[in-house]
Each structure stands twice: as C-alpha cells, then as structure tokens.
Image (cartoon, rainbow, N blue to C red):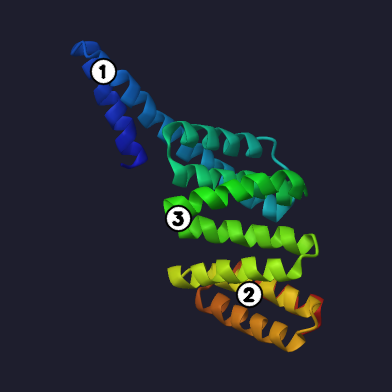
Amino acid sequence: MTVDGRIKEAELLYERGVFGDDSSVFDPAERGLDGVEADLALARGRLIHARYLRERVEDPRELGLFERAAELYGRLGDERGEAEALFWIGTFHQLVRDDNGTALPALRRARELAARAGDRLTLSYVLRHLGFADHMAGRLDSARAHFEESTRLRRELGFLPGVAANLIGLAFLAAQQDRREDAAELLAEAGRLAEKSEAHGVQRWVAEARAELDLA
C-alpha cells in the first residue's frame, strides 16, 4: 500500500472507531502510520545524506532519522525496511563520523536482514560499505571479495550506475595491489557504464580516480 493509501486507511479506521464503536481498529491504524513514519524518516535521512556528500557538513538530524526508521521497522517486523535503515546508520558512522568501529555492527546486522528478506539491492550497498571498511583496515583481499559480490548483485539487477561506482573501488584496490593494467580496464568499463546510464556524478568520480591513480 502507498503512503497515501495507508493514511487514507487510518482515516477510515478512525471513522470506524468513532462512529462504528469498533475498538479493534486502533492497533492496525497505529501500525500503518508507523510504517508511513518509518518510510518518511528513511527518505528524509537519505536526502540529508545526499546533501552531506555534496557539502560535507553534518546535519544533526540525519542519524536520528535513520535510528527512528530502524526502530519502527523493527517494531513492525519489517526486515527489509530495518535492513535498509541499519545500512544507513552504518553508512552515517562510516562516512560522516569516520567511525568504522560503530559502523560495522550495524552493517553486519543489515547484511543478515537484507539476505533474509531477499533484498539484493540493499545487500549490494551493505557489501560495498563492508568493502570500504576492509580497504581502510588494509584487508585488501576481503575488500575485493565484498566489492566483487556487490558488483555481481548489481549486474543481476541492472543497476549500472552502482556497478560503475563499484568498479572504481575495485580499480583503487587493483592499483594498491600493483595490478595497474586491471585498474585501467576497470576504470574504462566504469566510464562506459556511467556514460551509458547518464550517471554524471559517477563519470566525475571516474575522472578523479584516473587522475589520482595516474591512469589518465
């Protein structure tokens, strides 16, 4: 049911409760609105995070929104939603606070829930960020495995901008492991996919990676 549909349902349940003297409506109405609140908190938190990526200024609302979404999804038994909210909590700690120690438990729990819910897209994001954590810790083989599994899922889903973004990460790993030819090939494919999908932000990342790795 859409957000508007759930709000309309709550209105109808309100009428049944008041005019129909039906006390059974209150719990389902609350659950429906909890779902709306969770979806809204998650959407607003994602938008705030996107602004952070451009401006690099922490917004004090971001973490609280993701935590509220995770709490509500957990209360509703919505494992897919909870997995996504936990992913964003982990991402906040990893990217905004530069704190992998706090990020990793949330990311690992998100991986477990996303896998159980069959949410391959969220799982691909979680694996990507677990790859970041491994890379930062110097666990290059493990980082590569996480990025490659994330990329496999994204190819299956046809998520081309996400594939291109992952190939950039794999290129950095390849360069660090003295596989410069592989790095150049990975960036070339990333550039083609980004252009094909009109992912202009990813195209910029490819150009920046080529310059940083001296593979222009």
Instruction: Identify the residue at image location x=60%, y=72%.
Output: 148
Q: Residue at x 58, y 44 (%)?
A: 86
**Number of the label disc, if any, that sits on residue 24:** 1
Quarter where residue 53 is shown? bottom right
- Looking at the rendered image, the quarter that the C terminus falls into is bottom right
Q: Nearer the viewer, residue 146 or 187?
A: 146
Q: Secondary structure at mark 2?
A: helix
In the picture as drawn, the residue positioned furthest to the bottom comes out as 181
Q: Quadrant of residue 105?
A: top right
Q: Amino acid at mark 2?
A: Leu
Q: Residues within 10 Å of mark 2 (few under 14, many from 20)?
A: many
Q: CA distance from mark 3 to mark 2?
A: 21 Å
Q: Residue at x 56, y 66 (%)?
A: 150
Helix, strand, or loop for circle 1?
helix
Name the residue that disc number 3 marks: 119
Looking at the image, tell me whether mark 1 or mark 3 is earlier in sequence order: 1
Image-quadrant location for residue 184: bottom right
Q: Are marks 3 and 2 in contact (CB under 8 Å)?
A: no
Between 81 and 203, the one nearer to me in the picture: 81
Whichever of labels 3 and 2 marks the residue nearer the N terminus, that label is 3
Amino acid carrying label 3: it is Asp
Q: Which residue is mark 2?
A: 167
In the image, which is nearer the foreground, mark 3 or mark 2? 3
Q: Is residue 199 visible?
A: no
Question: In this image, 134 relative to 151: left or right?
Answer: right
